[in-house]
Image (tube, rainbow, N blue to C red):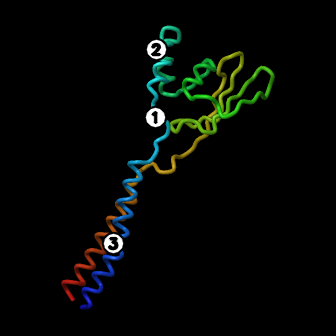
Amino acid sequence: MQQGETVFWIFMIVLTPISVGSFLVVIWWMARPRGETESAERIDRIWRQRDIWGEAICRQLIDRQVEPGMTPEMVRLAWGDPQSVRQPKPDIEQWLYDDAPPETTTNYVSFQAGQVTTATKATLKPLLTWGPWPIIIISLGISILVSMIAIGVVFFT
């Protein structure tokens, strides 16, 4: 085996895991769970209340928005059942949502006299906002660089 051939195969051994890794990242990104999918039943249950609550409120609930003045039933339709419930004062009830929907960052909702008084929010940054693209671009850049070196070694030595 010539020197150029040896270098070529060493580079191929390096490139193959990078290429396979990039491919697996793309497959993972496409197949990953994306949280709760919109339930037609949930939307239907909200929309049936349109005559009572009004179209604007129904659209907010479908978009999972909770605002002061909403009832516990509305909050349940928007976010589901709370993870836990506490009562810091006799006339105030708080619903804790540590697993709030991904598009929201609300930790708890406070009720007084059967209506939302506050929805306290914490700012959370998404872990991976750009998707797999930085990983793919870096992997492809490394692959192209190593390929160019391998081609140079094979053909110009």
Name the residue that disc number 3 marks: 15
> Cβ–Cβ below 8 Å for labels 2 and 1?
no
Using residue 105 as the reference point, say whether residue 33 is left or right of it.
left
Residue at horizontal 56 percent and vertical 29 percent from the top: 79
Instruction: Compute the Cα span from label 3 to label 1.
Output: 37 Å
| Tally of numbered discs | 3
Name the residue that disc number 1 marks: 37
Name the amino acid, label 3.
Answer: Leu
Residue at horizontal 31 percent and vertical 75 percent from the top: 146
Residue projecting furthest to the top:
51
Instruction: Compute the Cα span from label 2 to label 3.
Output: 56 Å
Instruction: Compute the Cα span from label 2 to label 1.
Output: 22 Å
Residue at horizontal 46 percent and vertical 44 percent from the top: 33
Name the amino acid, label 1.
Answer: Thr
Name the residue that disc number 2 marks: 55
Q: Nearer the viewer, residue 9 or 118?
A: 9
Label 1 Cα neighbours within 10 Å, binned few <14 / some 14-19 / many ≥20: few
Q: Is residue 79 above or below residue 34?
A: above
Q: Mark 1 or mark 2, which is nearer the start of the sequence?
A: 1
Query: SS for tag 3?
Result: helix
